[in-house]
Image (cartoon, rainbow, N blue to C red):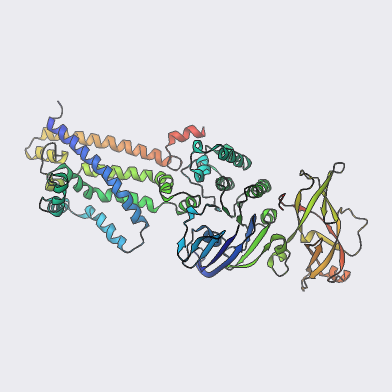
Amino acid sequence: MFLTHADILALTLTFKLAATTTVLLLLVSTPLAWILSKWQSRWRALIESIVALPLVLPPTVLGFYLLVMLAPDSNLGQFWYSVTGSHLAFSFSGLVIASMIYSLPFVVQPIQLAFERIDHASMECAATLGTSPWRRFTSIVLPSTRTSFLLASVLGFAHTVGEFGVILMIGGNIPGETQVLSLILFDYVESLNYEAAHRLAATLVLFSMVMLIVVYSLNRETLSAEGGRLRLSNRASTS
Amino acid sequence: MKLDLDFSGTFEQRRCNSAFQYHFKLVLENPGITAVYGGSGEGKTTLLRLISGLEKTSTGKISLDGKPWQSSHHFVSPEDRKLAYVFQEGRLFPALSIEANVLYGLGGKWRKLDSETKTLVNEVCEQLGIRDWFKRYPKHLSGGQKQRVALARCLVCRPRLLLLDEPFSSMDEDGKAGLLRYLANFVFRYQIPCLFVSHSRFEIESIASHAILIQHGRVIAQDTVADLVTRLDLALSHEEQSTSLLRATLKAHDTEYCLSELTLGSQTIWVQKLDTVPGEQLTLRILARDVIVSTLAPVTSSVLNHIEGEIIEIEHTHDSRVLLLLKVDRQKLLARITRKSLMALALKVGQGVYVQFKSVGLGATLTLN
């Protein structure tokens, strides 16, 4: 076979990690971005800085603190052990938590920017028509920001796939549990198995390329459509 | 309906970077349409925003029919006030189709509406002429078309109070009269009190029964439109387009000459044949400059109408023209004549005169009280 069993295992694990992280991050980032976009307090700068910190910190620094934080004798580690009966360090759950922190700015920032651009006049108008804040959010905010949500998901996903330094610090390189693509590739290179490294790297390049093409063409359709509606559905209605 | 409000605060104009204090104290008890009239930047829109709850002041008070919307310890948010607000620029939701825009305040889904509401939506959209645009999106519509949709979106909700901020400003004159008439009939049928901000005297005089005048963040006058426009101490009567409004009743049609006979108390006015039924109450709009005053009964003239009136006030100026306020069947009528004619005819307060009109306009035909 083209890829070894270990390669397939690492690939599946990486995508599972990226998908889980992206979904959880969207759930966390949407309210966070909403609060940040509305907040006028001077504390906003502090929270924004904390969110942006993973952008500037070397991944190893982040990884080191995460290792300390997730250790079995830490508060979080003990709490997690008492709730789930397993340890966070060197586990998939630990990786998810680490990835969420590492990729947080890539998801929060596009959404926050989109929320800040929301037309205040439309929101006022919706309120005078008697709609609840939740319906205003789903009917006005979400349709006009869906491009940014797509962008945030792609960035969060891709950034998690490309994660190396943090995972190296806290992952432990356990096949099927924490051995993700970047780690197994590193192993191949270290052991001078360039042929295996090429296969894996090329697969990843190909996959990334396909994913980006799909996203960009989708994005283009969305942007050129009627106020966020896909062009396909509009073409039917105007012809 | 009783709307009782008291707001004071600072009104900031971002455009010209100025600010002034406003103090709106107002009790509105009349049903029907109340016009809010005033120049640009005098605070008309601010008043509507305060009433709707979009603008919040710490000290304001407002209640509708005794139920407080805002008091020192209470604030009802805009979405719970069951009002509707037609914004000047329409404010359609760009991501939604015209149909979804119209149905927005009703929950957004056509199939979830009861049959009565469906009938109402159909009627409103038919009358406002927006039916054919249902599948389009707001960016395909012109400013005037957007305003029609915005009006429909608010009417179908049958709100407890309707706030209209220049809802016809982008529309062309052609279709406007029909829309005004439909709006007036609609709010009368469903007993929806309206506050109607407009720059257009034609719009106000066509459909509003009462008016408040706003100047520099204050209510300077509040009365029926017919009384406000004929008050010589207010700027309204001095505008070039100054008009008086007379209520008349349609008595009969004359099919031979294609005329309709209106009665004004015991007097008669002939106008071009109308398509309304006898017994209907009409509002006549008469421009002050179209009124001709004479001391003798005109016998040979092509002007069809002459009625009798009495001078009750003369405005003396040193200008070329003066304003006369006349009483015609307990109603007030403005006449603008030259000062020279005033002197030549030696007109005095209390004097009886004959009045002729060069033209008569009609407001919305309504069967109000």
- Number of residue marks: 0
Residue extending furthest toward the left: A191
User: Which residue occupies 16% across, 44% down?
Assistant: A84
Instruction: Reply above or below: A103 against B347.
Output: above
Furthest residue toward right: B299
Where is residue B222? Give x, y as percent.
Answer: 65, 65
In the rendered view, does B113 fall on the left or right side of B128? Answer: left
Quadrant of the image occupied by residue A139? top left
Q: Residue furthest top?
A: A1
Quarter in which the N terminus of chain A is drawn: top left
Residue B139 in sight in this render = no
Residue B110 in percent (x, y) is at 51, 37
Look at the picture and state if A34 lies above or below A15.
Answer: below
Q: Is residue A83 left or right of residue B25?
A: left
Along the line of sight, the residue nearer the viewer: B29 or B267 = B29
In depth, the one of B171 and B75 nearer the eye is B75
Residue B284 is situated, as x and y percent measured from the top left of the image, at 76, 54
Residue appearing at x 42%, y 42% in the figure? A228
Tell me: B13 left or right of B214. Answer: left
Can residue B341 be seen by looking at this rendering?
yes
User: Residue visible at 13% across and 30% down?
Assistant: A5
Q: Residue A10, image x and y in percent?
A: 16, 36
Q: Which one is nearer the viewer's eye here, A126 or B159?
A: B159
Residue furthest front in the image: B66
